Amino acid sequence: MVILRKCFPVNVIEMIANILGDTDKGLTGSEIHRLLLQASIEDKTQEGVMVAKRKNLFNSLASDQNKNKCSNNILRFIGYALAPSRYIKNEEEFERIRSEVNQQLAFVGYELTESGKFREIAVASTISDVQIKANNLKQEVEQRKGHSEIIKYCKAELLVNNYFHAVLEANKGLFQRIRDLSGIKTDGNKLIEEVFSKNPILIINNFQTSSEKNEHEGFCSLLKGLCCMFRNPTTHEPKVDWEISEQDALEILGIISYCHRRLDNYQKIR
């Protein structure tokens, strides 16, 4: 027995068509035609009429849903378009498109997994649904091979307003790890000075040659920079004035991830 999947709102169909039919990064016209036929959807492209392929795709998907009163064929089309086997040599592109499509599918309670299969999820109710943001951030961090200590801060409750709290808490986590490894309970620059001074408690290399000592000093300066960056805004400025975009968050988390990787090879020498 075939289960009839609930209809998609028109705006969701439109956004999915825009993603998959994007002029520069989407499917080609011939790919769309072939995949529509595979999904048993009539291609509504009119010969000789110049219409953007994303609009033709929208017309085809919307028309099929209106006719069949379900979204089965739309889901089938998406599944064919994002079959993992089509992206063996371009995994990054697969994840980019899958992430964008999943943001729209979340509003109808579906998600396309890495295996190319659909699963039902809780329906997102607003554009600011924080779980979508959390999943996207976590996925991006994992793709960049971020340190495991970073992943735990890509949580929905930290992203209620913006990416600030995920980055702030990840930064706090880095300094807590330094306290745990060193046994020093102070905070901020004082902690860094005590642990990574010229008579250090922790070292990240053999700390023998001039180059190794310079690298150690540079690492110390990097930690101090992270400390100052997130101490001043939280102490003196309202959070609303310290906006961090997803791109900014990913880049800062990358720096924190690097610091964790260097600490993975620490030596405690006193």
Image (spheres, rainbow, N blue to C red):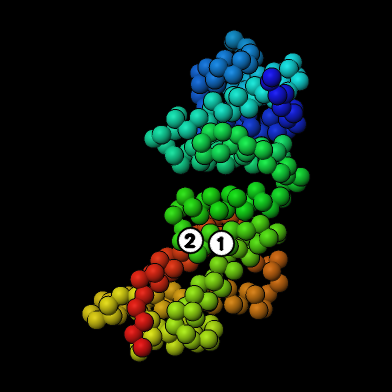
Q: Nearer the viewer, residue 156 or 53?
A: 156
Task: Give the labeled residue for mark 1.
Answer: 152
**On the rendered structure, is 239 left or right of 258?**
right
Q: Position of residue 200 (x, y in %)?
A: 37, 86
Q: Amino acid at mark 1?
A: Lys
Residue at x-position 65% and y-position 48%:
132
Q: Amino acid at mark 2?
A: Ser
**Image quadrant containing the N terminus:** top right
Q: Position of residue 233 (x, y in %)?
A: 63, 74
Taking the view exactly as shown, the residue that stands out farthest to the left is: 209
Q: Is residue 150 above or below residue 181?
A: above
SS at badge 2: helix
Q: Position of residue 26 (x, y in %)?
A: 53, 31
Task: Give the labeled residue for mark 2.
Answer: 148
SS at badge 1: loop
Q: Are marks 1 and 2 in contact (CB under 8 Å)?
A: yes
Q: Is residue 262 above or below residue 221?
A: above
Q: Position of residue 189 (x, y in %)?
A: 50, 84
Estimate the spatial distance between the alpha carbons at disc 1 and disc 2, rounded to whole Å.
Answer: 7 Å
Residue at x-position 41% and y-position 34%:
88
Residue at x-position 66% and y-position 34%:
15
Q: Is residue 188 above or below residue 249?
A: below
**On the rendered structure, is 16 left or right of 29?**
right
**Image quadrant containing the C terminus:** bottom left
Q: Residues within 10 Å of mark 1 (few under 14, many from 20)?
A: few
Taking the view exactly as shown, the residue that stands out farthest to the front is: 1
